Image (cartoon, rainbow, N blue to C red):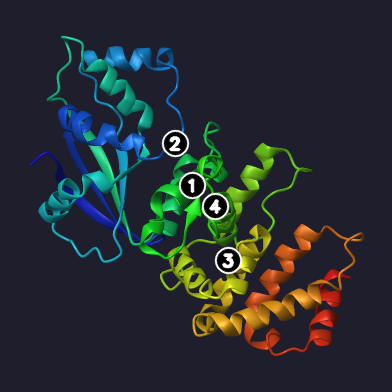
Amino acid sequence: MSVIIFDTTNDGVIDSVVATGKTTYKYAIESLYPLIDRFSAQRKTQDKKFYARLERDILDKCLMPPLTIAFVEPNFDKTEEKDIAKYIEDNIKSGYVLDGIQRLSTLNRAKDDERFDDSQSLYLNIIVSPSEDKLLYRMITLNNGQKPMTPRHQIEILTQELFDFSDVNLDVQSEKERGKTIVKGSFDLGDLSKAYLAFLTGSVNNDNNKIIGEKMDQIIVGRIMDKQPAKEDVNFKQVIKNIEKLSENDVAKKWLKVGNNLIGFSVGVKTSYDVIINISPDEFSNSIELFELAFKAINPSKVNLGKFRRELSQNFIENYAQHSEFDEMELVEHFMELTS
């Protein structure tokens, strides 16, 4: 076999199988190196002069530090080492390089030298995670402190690459795609990325131009780590499925397409998921119309409307069972208390 697994355990924090194994430089170049191109916006490889010494060491038969490769598999049930090794080989094209992009790039450059030995061993750490959210949690903790790739950038990448929007009835477009052709009624990928960040941090306020970007990134990492994923947690794929269902109503879809509403919804629904999942699109539309009537009572000259829209939509969705039964003046009064 091209991959040998010799130890497995479970990561109790992210409810994932973690395996340790090894392969060869040959397999790494043929099967692992292509994975670094899976992320269209992934952190660019550094100038090769930074890795010139590693390239020389590879030619001198060095043993490189282990790479970390990850998979998302909701129903992974392999326990035997040989079965895990076979799963990796069968599904390698679906893998992600969590740690080792620069080393793989250097290895690929070294392969053309006549002294290169493609039979040299390369050790691997393998993570098989049940959800994208838990994989991202581990990715953030692995890359924390690596300035070339901010947590917001990582989340933007994973939103685009890990979530398969083709299996939901939602059109999603990046800014680049919109520049070519706008699909009417499509969701903005950037808005979904911000909603995912809000979902992971449990906060609707992850942008603050009063705080230096580097410090804000540290705050975001802290928030994500504070929201350590639990086995029973709602995951973001479930949120997307819920958005798909509610978007069957045009009024509801138009509301959810507003970035600040989407952010508030994505945080709030973690609390009220069991309620919202049973609400019909038309019922949700009626509730949203109530929300908008009450929101219009806020004096736009006195507040930051974007901030309050995020916060009030979160509060409304979190307490949906109660607030959707309010009349307009009751909700206006509630909003007044929250914004005073």
Q: Quadrant of residue 33?
A: top left
Instruction: Give coordinates of residue 303: x percent, y percent.
Output: 87, 60
Tell me the residue at 83%/57% (across/down): 304
Q: Which residue is mark 2?
A: 42
Q: Which residue is mark 1?
A: 140
Instruction: Give coordinates of residue 17: x percent, y percent.
Output: 28, 57
Circle 4: element type: helix
Q: Is residue 22 above or below residue 83?
A: above
Instruction: Give coordinates of residue 69: x percent, y percent.
Output: 30, 43
Residue placed most toward the observer, 218 or 268 = 268
Q: Which residue is mark 4?
A: 193
Viewport quadrant of the N terminus: top left
Marks 3 and 4, Cα distance to the nearest angstrom?
11 Å
Q: Earlier in the sequence, mark 3 or mark 2?
A: 2
204 displayed left or right of 12: right
For disc 1, the neighbor class at 10 Å (few under 14, some 14 to 19, many from 20) is many
Name the amino acid type tagged 2. Answer: Gln
